[in-house]
Amino acid sequence: MEIEKDLHNYIRVFQEALPEKIYNNFVKICKDYDSWEDASIVNDSSGSQAVKKEERDTKRWGLNNIGNKSLTEVHWANFLKAFFKDGINQYLDLCGYPEAKDGFRVLDIQVLKYKEGGHYIFHVDHGMCVPRTFSCIYFVNDDYEGGDLVFKYPGSGEEKVIPKKKNTLIVWPSTFLYPHTVTPVTKGERFSVVSWAL
């Protein structure tokens, strides 16, 4: 179907997204971090959050720059916010919407660690309680097995697997047209950073 080909065009992959020195520093920060918490999902239409490991089994580190006592975390929160904003602006240029550049705000930044068995079932990122326009995933590493990012297109059920490659940023619309999953990690640990914009 032609619609699936069109949908492919709105998932954009940016390789070698960070300069090597910055990338190496960030990998070290991820591997050294020791205060991970269980990641939650939106539980119902009230917007409440709940940990449901059968649906999303991963650890998270929420980066923010407000009220944070760690200057390292404040630095990475500010840096990654600018990084995702720049990535979305490049996305808008490539998709032919330069007039929309800078007309959005980055909402949230979460560093994720998927251990063996870690996964996230098919879901979409936009919802009534979590309105989002753009979704971003940054692949930190690729030295693990399983843990694939897979999109499924409505109607045909066709799937698109995004190749694992460290230091890669993926941007796409958060709408119902892009349900996606992270398949279970079968060996090693998968680090990634997710963010959304409105």
Image (cartoon, grey):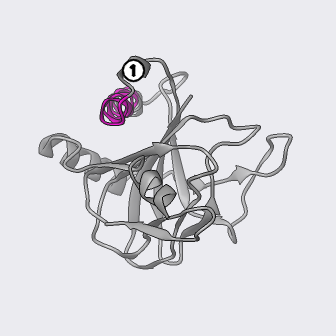
Q: Is residue 163 left or right of residue 102?
A: left
Q: Is residue 28 left or right of residue 180?
A: left
Q: Residue at x 31, y 66 (%)?
A: 164
Q: Nearer the viewer, residue 7 or 63?
A: 7
The secondary structure that most of the magenta stretch takes on is helix
Question: In the rendered structure, which segment of residues is drawn in magenta?
Answer: 78-96
Q: Residue furthest bottom?
A: 186
Tally of numbered discs = 1
User: Is residue 53 in view from this perspective?
Assistant: yes
Q: Nearer the viewer, residue 136 or 10?
A: 10
Q: Is residue 168 left or right of residue 36?
A: left
Q: Residue at x 35, y 36 (%)?
A: 91
Please determine whether, in this image, residue 94 is positioned above or below residue 59: above
Residue 167, image x and y in percent?
A: 25, 52
Q: Nearer the viewer, residue 73 or 174?
A: 174
Residue 17's image quarter?
A: top left
Q: Residues within 10 Å of mark 1 (few under 14, many from 20)?
A: some
Q: Which residue is drawn at 55% across and 69% down?
A: 119
For label 1, the residue is 101
Residue 66, image x and y in percent?
A: 53, 22
Please determine whether, in this image, residue 113 is positioned above or below residue 96: below
Under mark 1, the amino acid is Lys
User: Is residue 109 in view from this perspective?
Assistant: no
Please determine whether, in this image, residue 7 is positioned above or below residue 89: below
Q: Which residue is drawn at 55% across and 62% down?
A: 153
* Disc 1 element: loop
Residue 45, image x and y in percent?
A: 85, 44
Q: Was residue 60 drawn as part of the magenta stretch in this picture?
A: no
